[in-house]
Structure formats: structure tokens, C-alpha cells
Image (spheres, rainbow, N blue to C red):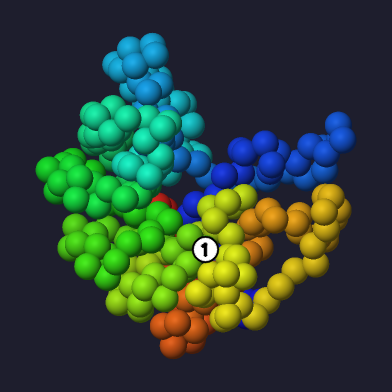
Amino acid sequence: MSRAKFIDIGINLTDPMFRGIYRGTQKHQDVFYSTVGCHPTRCGEFEQSGSEQYLSELKDLIEENKTKVIAVGECGLDFDRLEFCPKDVQLKYFEKQFDLSEQTQLPMFLHCRNSHAEFLDIMRRNRDRFVGGVVHSFDGTKEEAAAIIDLDLYIGINGCSLKTEANLEALKSIPSERLMIETDAPWCGVKNTHAGAKYVKTTFPTKKKWEVGHCLKDRNEPCHIIQILEIMAAVREDDPLELANTLYNNTIKVFFPNI
């Protein structure tokens, strides 16, 4: 298993929890690629400085960092957290971000929570405006997965995708050629209460305070991606190394097509 190659498609390395500064000392550095876009729960930002200016600033950020920005996003709809941004604002500015993907010819990194019908409606209307992408942190049904695949999109799996037996059944229905893997660290870890937890084989030493060689208690870490693979492979009855290779190649195909 140690020879498996991974590309974690969703991880929040710029989150303060991952900046590597502990008690005033820089403990570690990270090298990573990025997406540029507006999360659905933050779409109100479009209206704070004017939507066209905000969109222009996003495009400038992409143009100024062409070697590091590999997708437009994370964008989409999240009707589970309307307290952060109302539905009408999310709908308006999700659609607006297809301008970015069309102009830059970058794939999209997509978010869909409790909004499948509206999400699909917008995706279908704009499918010819972007080159492809992935719906990350998928937690929907088999039918919802099939509809996403019908749009020639990929599906990202993390701990939030593996909470219930229904989630596991949905995972089994997705062709391996349409899957990607992620942690969404420091969030979306596999909890002991998750249906998928029983398939985890690899654990890591953990401390309450940061220490070299240990994970932090209750924080999802990049290394936990192996646990996602173990669950995916067991549920699907796939060889772990073969599945890891497929997931890696899927990710290269979408986000690094020139490699």
C-alpha cells in the first residue's frame, strides 16, 4: 500500500490550521496547487464590491498564477447552510462563475449540498461553457451520481461521502473511471460512527498538541487519504493499488492534461 500514488483533489492547506506556525515558529512548509472561485456560502462577497469587479479580481488571480491555479472553484450550491448565503444569491453567482471557466478554459471544482435539482439545472444549461470537472465531497444518491456522470463529470469521495450505508451503495454504483479521492482536510475526516469506518486498516499516532511525526487529535490530515482509499476499495471489492492508480490517472486527465 505504501507504493500507492495519490492526488488529494480537495484540501484546505491555506486554512490557519495548516499554515504550520505553532507558538510563533514555522514548523513546516507546503507546496500545492490551487483553485480560484467563490464557495456558495460566500457568494455574498460578489455584492460587497460589485459583481463585475469581484469576478475581474478572480480572473486576475488566475492569470497571475497560471502555473499554480488548475481549476475554477470551489463553486456550486449549498442549501444546507443558507444562514451564510441565501438561495437566490447562490444561484445567481454560481452561474456567473461559468464566465471564468469559459474565459480561462479551466475545469471546474464543484460543490453540491442538498441542492441537486437546481445544481443539475444550472450545469445542464452551461455544460458547453466549461471543459469538465469534478463534484467534490459527494454525498448524494445513486441516481444523483448517475446524473452527474451523464454530464461527463467526475465525482470526488472523502469522509463525508462515507457516512451511511446508502452512501456506500452510491459509491459502489460509480464507475472507477469517474472517481477521484480527497480528504477535504482539516474537515470531513472519517469518524468512528461512519458506515465506512469499519473498513479502515491504517491508523496514525495522534497527539493533542502538534508534534513532528504525529497527527493532531480531531483534525483530518492529508495522510488520512489512505483511509479513504481503504474504504473505497473494500466497499467496491477493488484491488487498492489498482484503484489508487485509476484515481490518480483520472485526476491527471482533468487537472494536469499536459503532463
Examine the rendering and report whether any part of residue 210 can be seen.
yes
Residue 85 versus residue 32: which sits nearer the camera?
A: 85
Residue at x-position 45% and y-position 82%: 235
Quadrant for the N terminus in the image = bottom right
- Left or right for 126, reference 170: left
Q: Position of residue 130 (x, y in %)?
A: 23, 44
- Left or right for 9, reference 87: right
Examine the rendering and report whether any part of residue 96 can be seen.
no
Residue at x-position 66% and y-position 63%: 223
In the rendered view, tell whether residue 210 sits above or below residue 213: above
- Left or right for 94, reference 194: left
Classify mark 1: helix, strand or loop: helix
Quadrant for the C terminus in the image = bottom left
In the rendered structure, which amino acid carries the disc numbered 1? Gly
Q: Position of residue 201 (x, y in %)?
A: 65, 80
Residue at x-position 37% and y-position 30%: 85
- Left or right for 28, reference 64: right
Q: In which quarter of the view is residue 164 placed?
A: bottom left
Instruction: Name the residue carrying label 1.
Output: 159
